[in-house]
Image (cartoon, grey):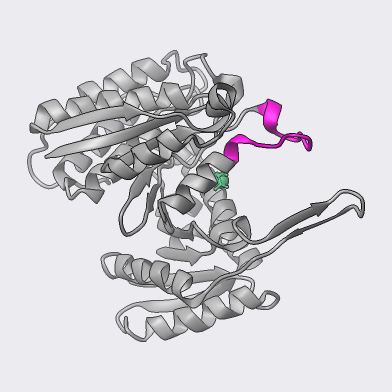
Amino acid sequence: MHLDIAVLEGDGIGPEVVAQSIKCLRSVEETFGHSFTFKNGLIGASAIKKTGNPLPKETLKLCKSTDATLFGALGLPEFDDNPKAKVWPEQGLLKLRKKLELFANIRPVKVFPSLVKQSPLSKTQVQNTDLIIFRELSGGIYYGDKSNDEDKNSATDTCTYTESEISRIAHLAFKSARSRKKKVTLVDKANVLETSRLWRRVVRNISESYPDVVLNCLFIDNAAVQMILNPSQFDVILTDNMFGDILSDQGSVIAGSIGLLPSASVGLEHAMFEPIHGSYPNAAGKNIANPVASILSVAMLLQHFKMNEESDAVVAAVLKSFSKKIVTPDILGSSKYGTNYVGDFIADNIMELDGSFNIN
Ligand code: IPM
Ligand code: MN
């Protein structure tokens, strides 16, 4: 198979982790006889510095004309907490998600058996965690009307959802549950928010077309507690843009490091693959960032294009790195291995698997 892949490294540790993912894709290319081409584009703080724009036109054009986008991370401290800034890096990612109509962000949270001790939570609490968050990605409070009136010291963010925005992601969540443990949990704040009440109505209606899937509804505050107390009770979590952002970071605590969790952002025509972590500017250039979230995002990319064996081979190589303790210091404080070494090890260990592959 041939794929044209747009590569948006972004800021901070973005370039370092994406470099490891590209090594892995090169290894998949060689092992399985595919051909991938990579075309780089600017986004985020580095794009602002070079062009004044966090999402230059060329980058959008590149992502629209390629089969998939591999995204690193963005954001730099000099743009945070700067009320005078006219543009900031995050705008680039938000605009890209909107323009590509990436309405579903799929974030699996799994506790790898060899890393179970990694979580600050107890082994019995986290060991069977295998959930997947379907976060709505192109609507809600992130994209509603905004205002900031400095004279009046007042600001507004509006949260709006339409039935069609909810139903398109709800169908994906129910379909995913069908191939998993057949449970969908809708997370909202329907005791307070009108948008949440709309989510409940639409999702309950849709659930009637999936009689084999059980639907539960939980308020976000309770869901946050339940996810820590007993994460294995969840299968598919369906939620809006903001709640999904928060819950998925919380999920990374269960998994043991935010450097482990990948994601796929999909729409009808485009797909982008991005770790859930940020740009970790303090680690940039130090060769300590964990490349696994980005590499597992590559596994999701391969799965998206139905290259299931290839995807399994990448995950198997990642698991091998865990079992051999070839990991970055966020996983093992005493580790002497850096981003590059771990990336090389994983890429070198991508090979055809014999027999069926079981992550456990
Ligand atoms: C994420 C990030 C982004 C988000 C930021 C960088 C805009 O936190 O992908 O989770 O809030 O969606
Ligand atoms: Mn986030």
| The stretch drawn in magenta includes residue 86 | yes
| Residue 279 coordinates in the image, percent (x, y) | 55, 30
Q: How many dots with numbers? A: 0
| Residue 342 coordinates in the image, percent (x, y) | 35, 21
As drawn, is 32 to the left or to the right of 233?
Answer: left
| Residue 109 coordinates in the image, percent (x, y) | 43, 50
- Judged by its main secondary structure, the magenta piece is loop
| The stretch drawn in magenta includes residue 197 | no
Q: Is residue 4 above or below residue 17?
A: below
Q: Residue at x 37, y 67 (%)?
A: 173
Query: Is residue 36 or residue 240 the one in the foreground?
Result: 36
As drawn, is 350 to the left or to the right of 170?
Answer: left
Q: Residue 297, located in which quarter of the rendered image?
A: top left
**First to last magenta residue range:** 77-90
Q: Residue at x 39, y 78 (%)?
A: 214
Q: Is residue 254 visible?
A: no
| Residue 207 coordinates in the image, percent (x, y) | 39, 81
Q: Is residue 329 visible?
A: yes
Q: Residue at x 44, y 13 (%)?
A: 336
As drawn, is 294 to the left or to the right of 318?
Answer: right
Q: Quadrant of the N terminus?
A: top left
Query: Is residue 118 or residue 294 the one in the foreground?
Result: 294
Q: Residue at x 7, y 39 (%)?
A: 354
